[in-house]
Image (cartoon, helix red, strand yellow):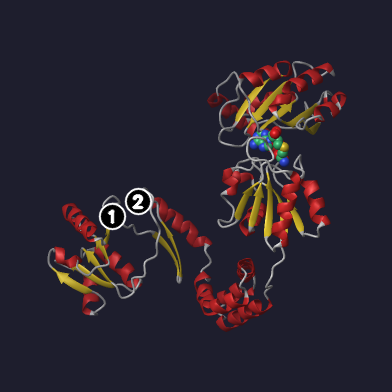
C-alpha cells in the first residue's frame, strides 16, 4: 500500500468521531488540537468526552450510528469496538466520498493517521502504510530526539519575513544559501534562549547582508565503493548542500539516494555502454554550473585521487579560478580487502601494498613487471577483467610463483559482492569460468589466502572449501 501524504487544514470543519470510549477520546483530542469542529456520536460518553460536551468544546450525537450523521462531515473516524458497524461506516463513507479512518483497520481506512512529531507550525508525520504502526512510533521516538525543539519558533519567525526574503533574494540558490546560513548562525541559539526580539534582529541582519548572486564552487567527492555506510560524514554534508551532482556510473544508487532531493543529477559515464561523456565535456559541465553560482559536487567512485583523474579536474578548475575542495573516499582496494576479509599488510606475509592499474590501453605495457613480481608485497590491481591473462602471464614470467594466492573481488561492499579465490597460475581461467564482470578488484599476494578463513560479508568466497556458516565463527575469534 503506497499512500499519498497530505496535511489537512481542518480549522472550523466538521469531523465525526463514532465511538465514545478512550480511543474515541484520543482521536477527538488530536482533531480538536488541529482546530476541527468535532462531533462524537455514541450512546454513552467517556467522562472526559462528557466534560468536553459540557464545556462546549465538542458536540454529542447521543444514540447508535445513523447514516445521516455523515451528512456534513469532511472526515470520519470509526472508533468503536463493533467491527460490523465499522464495515458499514467505511462503505457509507466511500459512497459519499468522505475520507474515513477505521481504528486498527488499515484496509477499511481511506486515510491513515501518522505518528507525529509536533514542532508547530512544523509537523513531521511518519507512516508505515499500515504495515507496522509500532515501527512508525519507534521512528518517531528517535526523530523526536533529533529535531531541535526551536524549529517551531524558527518557522513562525520566518513566516513574518517570507515575502521580504523572496523580494531580496529572487534567485533560488541564493535563497537556499540564506536559509542554510540561518540554520548555522546565531538565530537558533537566541531562540533557544527565548530571546525572540534578538533572534528576529539577527535574522534581519542576515537577510540584509545575504549574497544576492552566490558564487559557485566544486567539491571533488569520493563516494566510496558502493556501500553507502562507507561515505564520509563530510561527503554526506556536501551531497546535501549540492545544487548539481555530476556522477560517474560507478557511484551506487544507494549513495546517490543520500543526496539532496532536488539537486540536479547528471550521469557522466566514461565507460562504454552508456552514452559517452569525454573528460573535456565533464570539465565544461563543471565550469558551466559553477560559473552560474551553483554548488557542484563532482562525485566519483572510491577516492577521487586514486585512478580517478581528480588531479586533472582540479588543474582545470584552478585554471578557471573556480573554488574547490576535495573530500576523500574509501578507495576500492581498501573496501574490497576489508569486505573480503583480506588484510592488505601482514607481519608474516606482506610489508607493502601497491595500488596498480592495468586499466587503460597501453598501461599494461608500461608497468614495471620486475618490481610488481617481487615477493612479500600485496598488489591491489584496479582493472578491466580483460587484462587478467596478460597480468598472470607477465607476473609469472618475471618470477612470481604460480602458487601465489589471489582474491578477485567483484562488486566489493555491495549486496551482490562475489569473491573468487585461487592461485596465480589459475587466475585467468577461474575469472572466466565465473564470468567475472567489472567492477572487480584483484588482490595478489600471500594475504589473499586469508579470504577463505576471514570472510564475513555476503556469500562465501568461491573456491573456499568451507561454507561461510562454518567459517564465520573462526573469523570472529581470529
Ligand atoms: N577512484 C576509484 C577507482 C576508479 S578505476 C577508487 O578509488 O576506487 C575503476 C576501477 O576501480 C574498477 O575497474 C575496479 O577495478 C575498481 N572498483 C571500483 N569500485 C569497485 C567495487 N565496488 N568493487 C570492485 N572493484 C571496484
Q: Quadrant of residue 196?
A: bottom right
Label 2: element kind: loop
Choose between 329 and 352: the one closer to the eye.
Answer: 329
Measuring from the top left, give residue 273's x and y in whole percent. Answer: 63, 35
- Mark 2, other Cα within 10 Å: few <14 / some 14–19 / many ≥20: some
Up-down relation of residue 358 to residue 70 (above or below): above
- Tell me the residue at 30%/51% (across/down): 106
Q: Which residue carries the number 2 mark?
A: 130
Q: Which residue carries the number 1 mark?
A: 109
**Side (left or right) of 158 relative to 306:** left
Label 1: element kind: loop
Q: Quadrant of residue 474?
A: top right
Measuring from the top left, give residue 211's x and y in whole percent. Answer: 69, 72
Up-down relation of residue 23 to residue 355 (above or below): below
Q: Earlier in the sequence, mark 2 or mark 1?
A: 1
User: Circles 2 and 1: CB distance less than 8 Å?
Assistant: yes
**Side (left or right) of 286 relative to 394:** left
- Tell me the residue at 27%/56% (across/down): 103
Choose between 139 and 306: the one closer to the eye.
Answer: 306
Q: Quadrant of the C terminus?
A: top right
Measuring from the top left, give residue 378's x and y in whole percent. Answer: 77, 29
- Mark 1, other Cα within 10 Å: few <14 / some 14–19 / many ≥20: many
Any atom of ligand 1 within 8 Å of the CB at mark 2? no
Amino acid at each position: 500500500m503506497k499512500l499519498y501524504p497530505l496535511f489537512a487544514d481542518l480549522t472550523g470543519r466538521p469531523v465525526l468521531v463514532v465511538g465514545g470510549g478512550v480511543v474515541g477520546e484520543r482521536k477527538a483530542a488530536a482533531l480538536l488540537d488541529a482546530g476541527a469542529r468535532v462531533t462524537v456520536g455514541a450512546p454513552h460518553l467517556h467522562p472526559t468526552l462528557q466534560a468536553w460536551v459540557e464545556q462546549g468544546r465538542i458536540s454529542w450525537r447521543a444514540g447508535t450510528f445513523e447514516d445521516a450523521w455523515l451528512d456534513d462531515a469532511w472526515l470520519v473516524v470509526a472508533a468503536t469496538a463493533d467491527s460490523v458497524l465499522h464495515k458499514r461506516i467505511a462503505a457509507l463513507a466511500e459512497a459519499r466520498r468522505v475520507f474515513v479512518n477505521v481504528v486498527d483497520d488499515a484496509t477499511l481506512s481511506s486515510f491513515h493517521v501518522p505518528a507525529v512529531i509536533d514542532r508547530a507550525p512544523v509537523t513531521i508525520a511518519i507512516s508505515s502504510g499500515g504495515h507496522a504502526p509500532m515501527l512508525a512510533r519507534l521512528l518517531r521516538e528517535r526523530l523526536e530526539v533529533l529535531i531541535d525543539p526551536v524549529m517551531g519558533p524558527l518557522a513562525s519567525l520566518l513566516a513574518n519575513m517570507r515575502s521580504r526574503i523572496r523580494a531580496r533574494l529572487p534567485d533560488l540558490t541564493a535563497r537556499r544559501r540564506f536559509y542554510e546560513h540561518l540554520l548555522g548562525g546565531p538565530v537558533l541559539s537566541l531562540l533557544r534562549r527565548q530571546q525572540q526580539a534578538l533572534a528576529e534582529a539577527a535574522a534581519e541582519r542576515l537577510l540584509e547582508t545575504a549574497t544576492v548572486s552566490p558564487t559557485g564552487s566544486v567539491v571533488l567527492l569520493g563516494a566510496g565503493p558502493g556501500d553507502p555506510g562507507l561515505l564520509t560524514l563530510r561527503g554526506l554534508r556536501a551531497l546535501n548542500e549540492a545544487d548539481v551532482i555530476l556522477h560517474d556510473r560507478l557511484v551506487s544508487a544507494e549513495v546517490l539516494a543520500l543526496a539532496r532531493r532536488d539537486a540536479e543529477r547528471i550521469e557522466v559515464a566514461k565507460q562504454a555502454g552508456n552514452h559517452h561523456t569525454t573528460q573535456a565535456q565533464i570539465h565544461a559541465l563543471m565550469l558551466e554550473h559553477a560559473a552560474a553560482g551553483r554548488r557542484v559536487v563532482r562525485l566519483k567512485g572510491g577516492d577521487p585521487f586514486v585512478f580517478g583523474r581528480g588531479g586533472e579536474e582540479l588543474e582545470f578548475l584552478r585554471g578557471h579560478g573556480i573554488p574547490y575542495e576535495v573530500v576523500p573516499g574509501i578507495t576500492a582496494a581498501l573496501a574490497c580487502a576489508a569486505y573480503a576479509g583480506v588484510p592488505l599488510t601482514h607481519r608474516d606475509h606482506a610489508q607493502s601494498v601497491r595500488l596498480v592499474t592495468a586499466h587503460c590501453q597501453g598501461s599494461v605495457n608500461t608497468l614495471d613487471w620486475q618490481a610488481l613480481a617481487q615477493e612479500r608485497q600485496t598488489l591491489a590491481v584496479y582493472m578491466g577483467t580483460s587484462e587478467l591473462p596478460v597480468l598472470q602471464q607477465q607476473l609469472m614470467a618475471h618470477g612470481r610463483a604460480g602458487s601465489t594466492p589471489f582474491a578477485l573481488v567483484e562488486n566489493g561492499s555491495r549486496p551482490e559482492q562475489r569473491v573468487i579465490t585461487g592461485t596465480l597460475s589459475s587466475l585467468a581461467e577461474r575469472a572466466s569460468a565465473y564470468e567475472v564482470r567489472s567492477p572487480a578488484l584483484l588482490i595478489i599476494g600471500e594475504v589473499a589466502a586469508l579470504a577463505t578463513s576471514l570472510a564475513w560479508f555476503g556469500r562465501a568466497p568461491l573456491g573456499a572449501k568451507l561454507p561461510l556458516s562454518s567459517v564465520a565463527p573462526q573469523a570472529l575469534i581470529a
